[in-house]
Amino acid sequence: METSQGSNGVTLLNLTRYNAKNLEVAADGNFTANLKLNEGTDTTRFTLRTLDLAMNRMQEHPHSTYHLIKAGVPYVKLASENIDVKYGEGVSVKLSSQHIEKMQKANVELRFPQNIFTLEDVKVSSELQQLLDNQGLEGKISTSISTIGNNVVLGIQLELSGQIEGSHEMPLLDLSYSVKENHTTYAKWIHNINITKATVQNEDGSHDVQRFGQGFNILPTQYRN
């Protein structure tokens, strides 16, 4: 039996300067979304909200959430190859820098729900460690952990013994998390590890930079009271 996907709903949401636009979905399920930076901004965040006839809804899934960034803007971001994770599974996350030259120090603050994630480890990324070794430099990490409401607040300082030469794009840190296996509340859908502060220091001084976190789609294997 032939079926049409044209009745499924897809809405493009601008999450930076909130507005919504319903998109036309063809019978084969294809659609087109035109994205552009908000006027006067360096970044704009979009997501797709989907809805089928059975009223199954999804919004802000990492695979359908997009950041537009003005060319050359310095920023740090979190990224993971595995964003669909189950209870009890481990998650590897990489913190990278973009368009940041001659960095000497970086301070970032991460926040994540304490009932979902457990921090296991923070270390210098293998890519950065190789670069430091090649240039005869060292990297030192210090961390602090506190809680605000239901969130863990993780402060990380990365300090280098000298400037990294010629680096515009560089993985800085490897972070390891685990998704908690026992939850006091039902955990499903999208949960985020956010960067709430990001400052880098080079020979010109200390500067705040743009920052982008990473969402994860939690897939519970069973419900526990």
Image (cartoon, grey):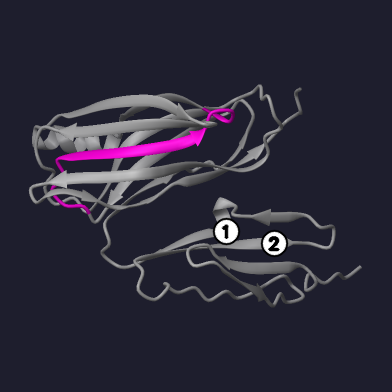
What residue is shown with label 1?
A: 64
Q: Magenta span has 101?
A: yes
Whether label 1 touches label 2, CB < 8 Å: yes
Category of crowding for the residue at label 1, using alpha-carbon neighbours closer than 10 angstroms: few (below 14), some (14–19), many (at least 20): some
Name the foreground residue: 84 vs 36.
Answer: 36
Question: Mark 2 belongs to which amino acid?
Answer: Thr
What residue is shown with label 2?
A: 50
Residue, x 44% and y 29% (percent of image)? Answer: 176
| Local secondary structure at mark 2 | strand
Give above or below for 30 relative to 148.
below
Q: Give the x, y percent position of residue 217.
A: 61, 43
In which quadrant will I find the N terminus? bottom right
| Local secondary structure at mark 1 | helix
Q: Give the x, y percent position of residue 203.
A: 7, 48
Give above or below for 124 relative to 22.
above
Q: Magenta span has 198?
A: no
192 left or right of 103?
A: right
Highlighted magenta segment, given as a residue range: 100-117
126 left or right of 185?
A: left
